[in-house]
């Protein structure tokens, strides 16, 4: 399981899109994969099969989603249905995207108010294992988030973002 960490600078009044990513069967690349490659080599292919939708390098600028082609698992090499958009390095994360049964996001705003901000029905399901939520940052300071899921993948993680009073 995993999620994107919010690491950018934010300012008061800004509207942001919060991406949440969920996966099972996590492995890592065992060899570099060039942009436009149609195969990737992973450390462990246990549990993967043709048709699985994978996330590569989640939470980064080179995050991408690919699908294993029919007959596309041979040892620890996956043949993909489409070429990679980005180059990927050894040890980058590869996971099979999966929708949890439930998602609960709790939020503490900078004024210290705790609340259950969103349930799964409040999030946009962009694709298998990919959810998002648009949020307007109406207070400056630290925003704290906790995410819990049930089902597979089972996940629990936290992150924070800091909102500055101005964009300068």
Image (tube, rainbow, N blue to C red):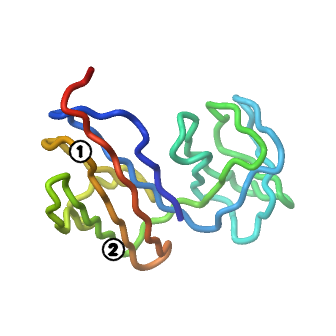
Q: Residue furthest right?
A: 75
Query: Which residue occupies the foreground of this view, 117 or 161?
Result: 161
Residue appearing at x 19%, y 32% in the figure: 165
Q: Which residue is mark 2?
A: 102
Q: Please provide percent x and percent y for residue 108.
A: 22, 60
82 and 140: which one is in front?
Answer: 140
Query: What's the mark number on residue 47?
Result: none
Q: Quadrant of the C terminus?
A: top left
Q: Residue at x 62, y 47 (%)?
A: 56
In x, y percent, where is residue 11?
24, 32
Q: Quadrant of residue 24?
A: bottom right
The mark that comes first in sequence, 2 or 1, is 2
Which of the labelled discs sits on residue 141, or is there none? 1
Q: Nearer the viewer, mark 2 or mark 1?
A: 1
Q: In screen coordinates, is 121 left or right of 2?
A: left
Measured as percent of width and height from the top left, residue 49 is found at 69, 64
């Amino acid at each position: 399981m995993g999620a994107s960490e919010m690491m950018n600078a934010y300012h008061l009044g800004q509207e942001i899109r919060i991406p949440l990513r969920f996966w099972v069967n996590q492995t890592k690349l065992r060899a570099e994969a060039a942009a436009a490659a149609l195969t990737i080599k992973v450390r462990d292919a246990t549990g993967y099969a043709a048709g699985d939708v994978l996330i590569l390098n989640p939470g980064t600028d080179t995050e991408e989603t690919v699908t294993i082609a029919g007959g596309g698992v041979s040892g620890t090499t996956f043949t993909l249905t489409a070429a990679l958009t980005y180059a990927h390095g050894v040890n980058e994360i590869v996971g099979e995207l999966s929708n949890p049964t439930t998602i609960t996001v709790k939020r503490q705003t900078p004024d210290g108010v705790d609340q259950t901000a969103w349930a799964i029905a409040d999030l946009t399901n962009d694709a298998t294992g990919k959810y998002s939520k648009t949020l307007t940052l109406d207070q400056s300071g630290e925003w704290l988030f906790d995410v819990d899921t049930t089902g597979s993948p089972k996940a629990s993680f936290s992150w924070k973002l800091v909102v500055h009073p101005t964009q300068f």
